[in-house]
Image (cartoon, grey):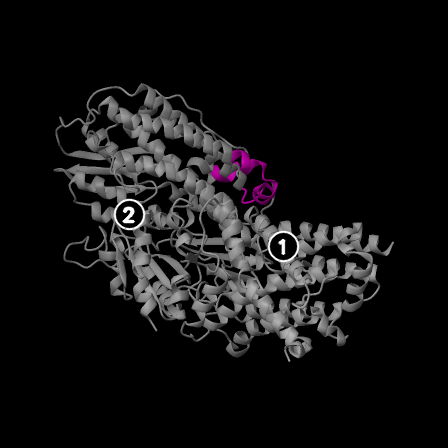
Amino acid sequence: MGIKSFSRVRAIHVMLVYTGGCNGCDIEIVNSILSPRFDAEQYNVFLTWNPREADVLVVTGPVTHLNRKPLEAIYEAIPNPKLVVAAGSCALMGGVYKNCYGDIPSEEIEGPVENIIPVNAKVPGCAVRPQDVLAGVVSLLPTLLDAD
Amino acid sequence: MFENILTNPIIVVILTILVCFIISTLLPGIERKYIHARIQQRIGPILIAPGIMAPLKFMFKENVKVSSPVSGLYKALPVICFIVVLCILIALTPQAYQIPALASLVAIVGFLKVEEICYVLMGALSKSVMSVRMPFPDKIKGAAHNNSNLSFIEDISARRSLRMITYGSFPLYLALFAPITAAGSIFLQDIVAYQQANGPFLFTISGGIAAIVFFIGYMIILNEYPFSIIKAKSDVIEGPYMEYAAKYRAVVYLTRGFFMLVLGCVFSVLFIGIPPTIMSLGFLVNILVALIFVFMMGIFSAFAPVFTNRQLLPTILCTSLLGILAIGLGLL
Amino acid sequence: MDKKVPRSNIIETEIPMGTVHPAALEPYRVRFFVEDEIVQEAEITIGVNHRGIERIMEGLPVEKANALTEKICGICSNSHIWNSCRTAEMGLGIEIPERALYIRVIMGELERLHSHFLYLAHGCEVLSHETFSMRVFYLREIVMELLAMIGGNRVQYGCSVLGGVRPRCDLDEAKLLRLKNDMDALEEGLTGFVERFLADSIVQSRITGIGVLPQKQAIELAVTGPTLRATGVARDLRTTMFEYDEFDFNVITQPDGDVKSNLVMRALESFESIKIIRQAIANIPEGKVVNRDWEMFDIDITESYIEVPRGTLYHSYALESGRVRHCIIRTPSMANIGAMQYACIGDQLTDAQLCIVQCDPCFTCTDRAIEIIRR
């Protein structure tokens, strides 16, 4: 293990972006990082709100129309190497909101997240459990370590 | 041969700086793991994560084009900050006492001022994606004021840093000048010599009060909670540091830990009379003082919310009055 | 309390925040019009979350539509499904077993606890007081585990169904015992927290007199729920709901309408919720939990109001051959947006997000009925 991988595995900065889900996933993720019960910091996962600092972008929600451009802008602002975790069934496949009009495509829902930015890990669940979020972020580590 | 090396002042200074730097990288980790996490009843990150591993990781990140009108200057600012902190440490070492212009309190105050001005420039030059540049259709009908000029959140932060220069850093400077009243000289050499002859300034009444004032000034200049208004998370997110990425963010991280240690050394020189040099056992006192400061700061910051201007002004006013009292007592 | 400054036409600067911001738990845009760091005017733009739930519900079978209302909001999901079932039950005249009503009340109060704890934790986080925030999150975990025990999921538990509650959510002896013990633990933890919180003079100086919403203004803006009660108006729909007839509880009010009143309000109301849950555990009747014996017929628009953690929730729809028609949902945050904008005025910019948070915003709830005109 080189010094690059060694340092990356010991400091992971996570940024959260909510794109219009039902709040359930958002609060579970905040819970997994802020609550001392789960305490993501013991795995050296730090919460940040600045895209310039982030390594991993955690996206929840089905990406509503007004949220599409902010999401893209934040993704652009993160320096490489960067990874994206889509958390919750809305972020994975649009949830109950996608295709709600049958054959007519919904104007409101631009998601799932995959349509907008490349996704590296998917965490299923409605709503996601905090343990799953941590597992999802940790499962990305091999990809992050091998990146240039 | 070996003795020659150890008597060469330049090599001793370089060795001192290196040891200080290595210890300083541990300080943010100590604050985060052993104080904040313990108070919050959780395990917390490993010791080396915030101070060493995070900067190393940022070193290996790809550089991005910084969104700033003068990106060259903006990128240079953290490096300038680092050099300023380095200069303060050099000025404190006994080898530097040969150069009276450097090893005086006026020089240290000047360096600290440069550091503060850097915050203003950083804030003014940073144009982050998180506020105005967020692509969102804001120009809707029914807005209260349609033609007002837009400000980035960092502009607010720059204005706050300017305000902190005018009154926020008063306590620290008052505390720095308090030892002069006892030693009667602005040169570090004389201050150290006086204290080695007459016992530490800390253990006089005036010195005790000045030490409290110094501690509050230390928290203010490090922008730690509760005095972190220039980077309050509830409105300006990270303030001046918003746009730094990759290597420059690594420098920002390193500077913070280094600055904590150097301010601890400033205290031990001015109030205890032990200059930092690895040639004497007194160096351990320097480290100990820095650690005690970090511990105290961690405890205070874990139990305090961020102060707004409403609370800052009275706090700083009271602290400044205490500082004036300390100087007055020293003069009597 | 005349802190509000007169509105001037020329403003120094405008600071937009959002849609992603650390102080916001959900995407919304807020523009502060600021003069010398004092907020002169605030404007909240919602519609960022709009997904069109009511449109999706239109034409769905009523059982499916009820399940869908849970997805309106991840914080008060149980309230939505409860009120939606209640609407159909009122229209169709379904009789609900006594035991099911008790379980619904227990779930409703547990949800109020978790919502209020989230509010306290989030409020402390916006204050940048990480330690208090973590302590409340730790207490909240007790409630979350109880919800997971009863409903099987941590967030959306789908407790209510037409005619009662899901048989999965029935409470046996062991569950009731655990509920009882955890209520004791929760009360102890919350008492400790409130004592610490009120004794912390730094925090008190930070939150007293901030974001004042006068009582007159609150009534004018038709504010509902705890935000209204924090201004001194004792109005709680639970006193009129037949589910709560057999329970004895107090309507908590606080005098000032500032952040302190709001935070203390929520903490004291949590004690009342614990009291209600204890009464429910003691008196829960035996019997079945769901009544399957009912007829479906067409009904005209039926309305139902209940008190949810954040205020008054309104559901209304008509049924046509078992399908939902003309669905309207009005959530408490819709009424409270005015209060959020008003509370910011005249305060420091650092406090502005706190003033929005004090009204307990839930914009994912709110963003349904808005038509976005796109050019």
Q: Is residue C198 magenta?
A: yes
- Residue C53 left/right relative to A4: left
- Amino acid marked by disc 2: Ala
Judging depth in this view, the residue of A147 and C125 nearest the camera is A147
Q: Examine the rendered structure and indicate whether residue C373 appears above or below residue C99.
A: below
Q: Which disc number belongs to residue B293?
A: 1
The number of numbered discs placed on residues in the rendered structure image is 2
The quarter in which the N terminus of chain C is drawn is: top right
Q: Residues within 10 Å of mark 2 (few under 14, many from 20)?
A: many
Residue sticking out furthest to the front: B1
Q: CA distance from mark 1 to mark 2?
A: 43 Å
SS at mark 2 in the image = loop
Residue placed under numbered mark 2 in the picture: A127
Q: Tell me, yes or no, if residue B187 can be seen here.
A: no
Chain bearing tag 1 is B
Q: Residue at x 27, y 56 (%)?
A: A62
Quadrant location of residue B255? bottom right
* Residue at 52% over, 65% down: B253
Magenta stretch: dominant secondary structure = helix
In the image: residue B221, left or right of residue C103: right
- The question of residue B303 being in magenta is answered with no
Q: Position of residue B297 (x, y in %)?
A: 60, 52
Residue at 13%, 37% in the rendered image? C322
Query: Of tags 1 and 2, which is closer to the observer?
Result: 1
Q: What amino acid is found at the position of numbered circle 1 in the picture? A: Phe
Q: Chain of mark 2?
A: A
Q: Residues in magenta?
A: C194-219
